[in-house]
Every structure is written in C-alpha cells, then in structure tokens.
Image (spheres, grey):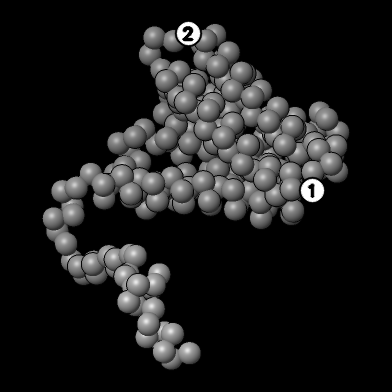
Amino acid sequence: MAKDIEAAPQGGEFSTKDYSDPPPAPIVDFEELTKWSLYRAVIAEFVATLLFLYITVATCTAGVSGGHINPAVTFGLFLARKVSLIRALLYIIAQCLGAICGVGLVKGFQSSYYVRYGGGANELSAGYSKGTGLAAEIIGTFVLVYTVFSATDPKRNARDSHIPVLAPLPIGFAVFMVHLATIPITGTGINPARSLGAAVIYNKDKAWDDQKTYHV
C-alpha cells in the first residue's frame, strides 16, 4: 500500500495540487475602504439580514398571535371571520401602541437622524392629490392583504406542508413591491399602526392632516 501511495505522484491523479489556497486576509487593510466591492458586500449583508430577520420574526410570532403586525391585516382577517371582534380590537390596540413605542425609541436613540428624515412620518408627496394618495394606499393595502390570505390559505396548507413555513417570504416580497410603487406618492403606509405611530411622536400638522389617507 505504501508503494502505491508513493508511486501515485509520478503520474497519477494526485501528482499535482488542483487548487490554491487564498492568501490570508490582512487584519487591517485601509485600502479596502476605497473599493466598491467592499460596500457592495456590506449592502448585500444588510439586505440579507433584513430579509432574514423579517422572515424569522414573522415565522416566530405566527404561531403565537398570527404575526399580523398590521391593523389592516387584522381587520381583513376579522372580516373573513378568522379572528373574533375582541381579539381584533386588542390586536389593533397592541399594534398601535407598539408602533408608538418603536418610533419613540428611534427618536430617543437617533434624534438627529429622526429630525433629519421627518420622523419617518407618512406624508403625501408634493404634486399628488389626496385622491391619488388614497388610491395608491388602497391598492397597496389590497395587494398586501390579498397576499396574506393567499399565503395562509388553509387549503394550500393542507396540500403543501411547506407553505406555512414559507408564508412570510411572499408576504415580504409583496411589501417590497408595494413600497417600490407607493414610496414616491405617499411614503408607503399600508399599515395604519406604522403611520399612526410616526405621526404621534413626530406631531406635526402636515403628518396629522394626511393621516386619513392612511386609515381609510
């Protein structure tokens, strides 16, 4: 056996190393800060972690409360008789309080950015009428709630056992697409709790005046 191993390097498949080890990365490389590849990788990590946590949080809370996180979703499920009136009301109250507290934390920890970006409050963009803004919010919210119903349909769950696990994925993509379409118009509400929480903490006339667009 030893002779076979020794003979192999003379012409066998193990005669040459078919790969090369990458050089060790330097501990500190300031030149890397000038390369776009570094920032592209950082952006990729940001997006990947964002999607990971969104899907994880939605999956973890789905088994406890259903993971609504949105009064519009809760109201839609109430109309479909998926939740009771009492549960729906308590969910909506909890969602709005959670949104207010969340925005309050942002203001407390990042006050300079909070003020710079208008407190994250939803406001109708200049050049768009209230009717256009309302239509954009109605369509966006419809797409979101429709996707939630489709992704959590009991008939699909019974047929495809993996659907409940993957449900947050299509919902997340629906939110992403709606944001692309409505951010230039309304800043994307599609979540009354999110709009209310930002308006309460920011507390400016413009944000309050446009609130009905996000709650109708």
User: Mark 2 and 1 residues: CB-CB less than 8 Å, in contact?
Assistant: no
Residue at the outermost left position? 31
Marker disc for residue 10: none
- Neighbor class of circle 2 (other Cα within 10 Å; few <14, some 14-19, many 20+) is few
Q: Residue at x 47, y 44 (%)?
A: 103
The one of 189 and 97 positioned closer to us in this rendering: 189
Q: Quadrant of residue 88?
A: top right
Q: Quadrant of residue 92?
A: top right
Q: Residue 85, how many percent across, how many down?
A: 82, 37
Q: Residue 44, how many percent across, how many down?
A: 39, 46
Marker disc for residue 129: 2
Measure the C-alpha gap from mark 2 to mark 1: 45 Å
Query: Nearer the N terminus, badge 2 or badge 1?
Result: 2
From the image, which quarter does the C terminus lie in? top right
Q: Amino acid at mark 2?
A: Ser
Secondary structure of residue under mark 2:
loop
Q: Residue at x 48, y 36 (%)?
A: 198
Q: In this figure, what is the number of numbered marks? A: 2
Question: Does the rendering let one see residue 83?
Answer: no
Q: Which residue is mark 1?
A: 161
Q: Amino acid at mark 1?
A: Ser
172 to the left or right of 29: right
The one of 215 and 61 positioned closer to us in this rendering: 61
Q: Residue at x 18, y 52 (%)?
A: 33
The one of 90 and 194 positioned closer to us in this rendering: 194
